[in-house]
Image (cartoon, rainbow, N blue to C red):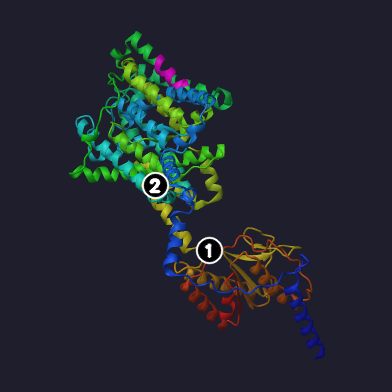
Amino acid sequence: MSSAVHSTEEYDMDIRSLSSSHRHPQDAPYVHKVGLPPKQNLFKEFKATVKETFFADDPLRSFKDQPRSKKFILGLQAIFPILEWGRSYSFAKFRGDLIAGLTIASLCIPQDIGYAKLANLDPQYGLYTSFVPPLIYAFMGSSRDIAIGPVAVVSLLLGTLLQSEIADPVANAAEYRRLAFTATFFAGITQVTLGFLRLGFLIDFLSHAAIVGFMGGAAITIALQQLKGFLGIKKFTKKTDVVSVMHSVFASANHGWNWQTIVIGVSLLSFLLFAKYIGKKNKKLFWVPAVGPLISVILSTFFVFITRADKDGVQIVKHIEKGINPPSVNQIYFSGDHLLKGVRIGIVAAMIALTEAIAIGRTFAAMKDYQLDGNKEMVALGTMNIVGSMTSCYVATGSFSRSAVNFMSGCQTAVSNIVMSIVVFLTLQFITPLFKYTPNAVLSAIIISAVIGLVDFDAAYLIWKIDKFDFVACMGAFFGVVFASVEIGLLIAVSISFFKLLLQVTRPRTAILGKLPRTAVYRNILQYPEATKVPGVLIVRVDSAIYFSNSNYIKERILRWLIDEEELVNKSSQPKIQFLIVEMSRNQATLNWIFIILYKLTYYNGVSKLVYDPYFAFGAAVTDIDTSGIHALEELYRSLQKREIQVTPVHQYCHLASML
């Protein structure tokens, strides 16, 4: 009896020494009591929450304690960043921007003509879109590297959505253009609204995996669409799915293919791919793939002109209207049936354009180590599309291929966009008649070579290795675009992204922890096969806040684990589960709780000393528990009482332990 009392007193003394010791790393620090947070005024609490949600970066910070004149200048600089960085602009920077602007201009001119055809518009509208929007963006954008203009994915998306409303873009060309300008206007309105209301986080709901799949599927679809010009087919399907396209291609094989067109297309595509290969092998030769499209256009146009191959069935661009952008304000639908159609198409195009532009901007900003203001970018992109819709442009955004060339060409600021815009202006004024004999095959070859890079096999493989559900989202978006349509693929991408989000909220990650051999470190037994469970103890980790949406699942998940453990115990004759430790936080107080609890459990098994591990609970993150979560824990506690199992919740809200 005395020995038992002595053991108990010795144990209590050890616990007190562990709790109060601060000097030795192997001893647990003192466990501080966690109190309730101070009460706050409801209005102040709501105001603080809204500010943290929508104005986390404190955009008005620079305006504090400034005179009115300074605030006015800062306001102008916030709207037009060029007024800020333009003060330190130098000739050395201009030299880099001039070279970059000329380089991307040589790439964008042939691409613009092809992308306009992808959107079922006349070639000059692609050039218009690379004249006005880049000028607006240069004054309002915060990225130094984005090259603005039409892009393949948005052009295809816009063309597909518009064609679903107006079946024949050729017979109803005027109506089709009006709807395109209307969609562009409301795309700009959407982007500006998101920027002003600071709702840019909405575009993050489209997961990276879904974007990879969507872009890859769109690239395949775009490439298949180019078979019409690549093979010289005159009658081609209006559908975009792979089955319809391939059926149309092979159905016209006997009488619809033109061998001269195929020779031109294959030769120039091979040249463009070889130029890309040279650029990848030697970064100093980045200009080779950049000027490749323009060289291809010049060579093929000259060849068709001197041989008059157009008389032998080689389809050519023919007429490109000369002159700069005509006004189109009076062509935008502000009423009638087409208004809602334009709004719907514009919103969809706006979100895809934003996703691509923000992703590109963030990528290059990280490379050059500067900050990109996403909300300013949205306002800039939206403003340029609103102005563009009034000047005969369709939806413009940041182009990855041109932005990469812009970056590698040594661009310093957005002045490279101004240089590109001036070159496009000169092209519209003086050079467009020279494109008359440009074969459609070279435009198809340019587009195919440009979109090949959108199929990212490495990213898809990495997604497969990391998260199988993400891979399902990626493949769902990919096959939706390829086998159905761009709209269906986009819908699948968004749906799967939202479903994954809901799944993560309602089914958070939980894990059983085991002890690593020869350490006091506890890890997920599925990730660390050598980790062993503590006999008679079940340690469960919850990696999510406990809300009404997941509280019942967490309770049932823990109970199912207990049932499984009891079955294993019965089969292997191990000690019965007597303790449940629910590990919910990675803060220091939590480490102390777990350490003391495990010390208590292991002391009676003959272990008198434990090595304290500060990385014990790394990975868990229960940041909050609402009333539903508390009720679920109460129900869990009552269920465990019936099983004669003691439960110890380990959490920063340590007062819950006494409640349970």
In the image, which disc is placed on residue 589? none
Dividing the image into 4 quarters, which one contains the N terminus? bottom right
Residue 453 in sight = yes
Q: Is residue 253 left or right of residue 71?
A: left
- Tell me whether the residue at label 1 lies in contact with that at label 2, contact meaning CB atoms closer than 8 angstroms: no
- Where residue 201 appears, x then y in whole percent? 43, 51
Identify which residue, 112 or 200, lies in the foreground: 200
Q: Is residue 434 magenta?
A: no
**SS assignment at label 2:** helix
Amino acid type at image mark 1: Ser
Near mark 2 (Cα within 10 A), the count class, few <14, some 14-19 or many ≥20, is: many
Amino acid type at image mark 2: Gly
Q: Nearer the viewer, mark 1 or mark 2?
A: 2
Segment colored magenta: 291-299
Identify which residue, 193 or 638, lies in the foreground: 193
Main SS of the magenta segment?
helix
Residue 73's image quarter? top left
Q: Which residue is mark 2?
A: 195
In the image, what residue occupies the spot 20% across and 31% down?
174
